[in-house]
Amino acid sequence: MKRIVLLLAVCLVSLPAAALAGDYHVGSTLPCYDCHTMHYSKTHDYSSDVAGFGTTTLAAGGPFDYLLRQPGNDLCLTCHNNQPWAPDVFGQGTGPAVRMGGGLNAAANPHATLTNDAGYDEGDGHSLWSTDVAPGGTWTAPSAEGLECVHCHAQHGIASQYRNLLNRGSFSGKALTYAKLTNDLTKDVFVRAPLNYDQSAVDFNEPNVRQSAYGNWCKTCHTNFHGQGGDPNMGGQQANNDSSGTAAKAWKRHPTADVNIGSVAGTHVSSLTAYNNHPYTNRVKVMDSQGIWNTGPGNVAPNTVTPSCFSCHKGHGNKNSYGLIWMGGAGAVTEEGDDAATLSNGSKYIALCRQCHAQASGYAVGFP
């Protein structure tokens, strides 16, 4: 079963062919009656303008707050779990896409009919209905319903915001803009193809070389894991490629912005040589201010590529602990990684870390 921390389209089928992620749930793609019922008295069936899309049924126990047909998460999953017309974002995906965000899981909840798909367990990413404190921060769900899709996504859409991610409330001022079809280096994300959530269709720009808009957005809940070099919670360099003569400082937490791969000469922090000479085909996602993302040996990355949250984690999660991406091989890429996923646990970590870090011996000749 599945669902999304993205409140994307209630009805993917009804979208214009050129529509993209943040365009869903806005304008003509947002029929009110797909989610709301005026008097909670509907006894007949009817469909929206697109054949094959049946409107959401009324759940037992209503009427619900905000005139919703079902409780929040259940309502979102009506479309975003095992349906052909909208992205499947809960557990195992039903389509061929290697989802950029992966899949959510469910914490223990009062919905006895909802169970996690095989391999999608609590701790493997974001858990709907969870009441736990967000790692690295203090955020907890504001009600007994726990984590809900609408805590991260705008149910009525924000056309300018990548994946309808919130840009209000606690997220005010945290824009995560995106370019469609043709890249724009002033935007944070480049979505290459319409109606496509495959990781191959998404790349990340770096308009501000000292920040990650993606990381800044995640920081809303996971506060201590994000910041710039020199911040008390982060440690590290005062600035990327610092030429002031100031000695490099040790990092307390892995940087999510402002440090390029291999930019700190002689410190063994990371190695662009290791990244470019990586003996395997597949590489993790990075940001780049020039819009140059290499995809394998022979495609040399510039000295401007920067790791961020999505380099190591799936936003929703996957079958690995913490939603980690065990990348480090040459085989088919899945939401869990690639060949590295078949290694022993210790070697999985090594395979991922060796994407950028050269000091582990043998990085250039193969993994254990």
Image (cartoon, rainbow, N blue to C red):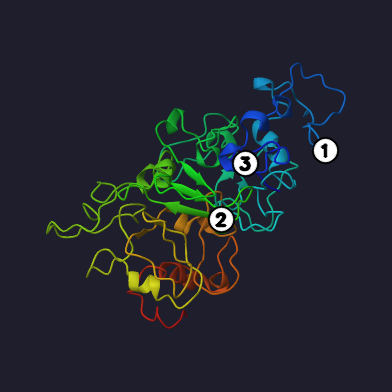
Residue 65 drawn above or below residue 238: above
Residue matched to label 2: 201
Residue matched to label 3: 19
Q: Cα distance, mark 2 to mark 3?
A: 14 Å
Q: Residue at x 53, y 58 (%)?
A: 321
Amino acid type of disc 3?
Ala
Which residue ends up furthest to the left in the rendered image?
245
Label 1: few (<14), some or many (≥20) within 10 Å? few
Residue matched to label 1: 51
Q: Nearer the viewer, residue 56 or 196?
A: 196
Closer to the chain start, of discs 1 and 3, is 3
Residue 318 is situated, as x and y percent measured from the top left of the image, at 58, 56
Closer to the chain start, of discs 2 and 1, is 1
Residue 363 drawn above or below residue 176: below
Callout 1: SS: loop
Closer to the chain start, of discs 2 and 3, is 3
Q: Residue at x 62, y 37 (%)?
A: 24
Residue 12 drawn above or below residue 238: above
Callout 2: SS: helix
Amino acid type of disc 2?
Ala
Amino acid type of disc 1?
Ala
Residue 146 is situated, as x and y percent measured from the top left of the image, at 57, 35
Which residue ends up furthest to the right in the rendered image?
44
Q: Is residue 220 visible?
A: yes
Residue 338 sits in quarter:
bottom right
